[in-house]
Amino acid sequence: MTIRFAVRGEFIQLDQLLKATGLCESGGAAHAAIAEGRVKVDGAVDTRKRAKLRPGQAVQFAGEVVEIAAE
C-alpha cells in the first residue's frame, strides 16, 4: 500500500515521518527500526535516524511505501 504524506516546509526527519504516518508507535520504536536496517529510503537501507527527507523521495517500511509530497 502507498501512503502520500505532505511535508510542511522543506523536509521531515525520517524518525518523525515514521511516527507521523503511524507506522511506528513512538520515537523509540522508529529509532530501533531504523537502527536495525528495516527502513529503506529511495530503495536503499538508511540507518540515519534524522535523515532529512524531501518531496519526491519514498520510504519503504513494514510492507508500506510512503511517498513524500510538497504541501
Image (spheres, rainbow, N blue to C red):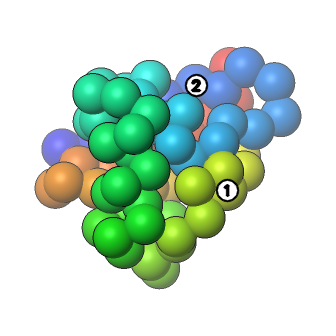
Q: Quadrant of the C terminus?
A: top right
Q: Amino acid at mark 2?
A: Ala
Q: Where's residue 29, x and y in %? A: 32, 42
Helix, strand or loop under label 2: strand
Residue that label 1 marks:
51
Residue appearing at x 67%, y 36% in the figure = 12
Mark on residue 29? none
Indicate whether 46 appears above or below 29: below
For this rendering, which residue is in front, 71 or 63?
63
Q: Where's residue 21, x and y in %? A: 37, 27
Is there CB contact under 8 Å for labels 1 and 2? no
Q: Where's residue 35, x and y in %? A: 43, 66
Indicate whether 43 appears above or below 17: below
Q: Amino acid at mark 1?
A: Ala
Q: Tell me: 49 left or right of 50.
A: left
Q: Where's residue 5, x and y in %? A: 49, 29
Q: Tell me: 4 left or right of 23.
A: right
List the single residue furthest toward the front. 28
List the single residue furthest toward the right. 10
For this rendering, which residue is in front, 21 or 30?
30
Mark on residue 6? 2
Indicate whether 16 appears above or below 50: above
Indicate whether 4 appears above or below 55: above
Residue appearing at x 56%, y 47% in the figure = 14
Other-residue count near label 2 (Cα within 10 Å), few / some / many at <14 / 14–19 / ≥20: some
Other-residue count near label 1 (Cα within 10 Å), few / some / many at <14 / 14–19 / ≥20: some
Helix, strand or loop under label 1: loop
How many numbered marks appear? 2
Residue appearing at x 27%, y 27% in the figure = 25
Q: Tell me: 14 left or right of 40.
A: right
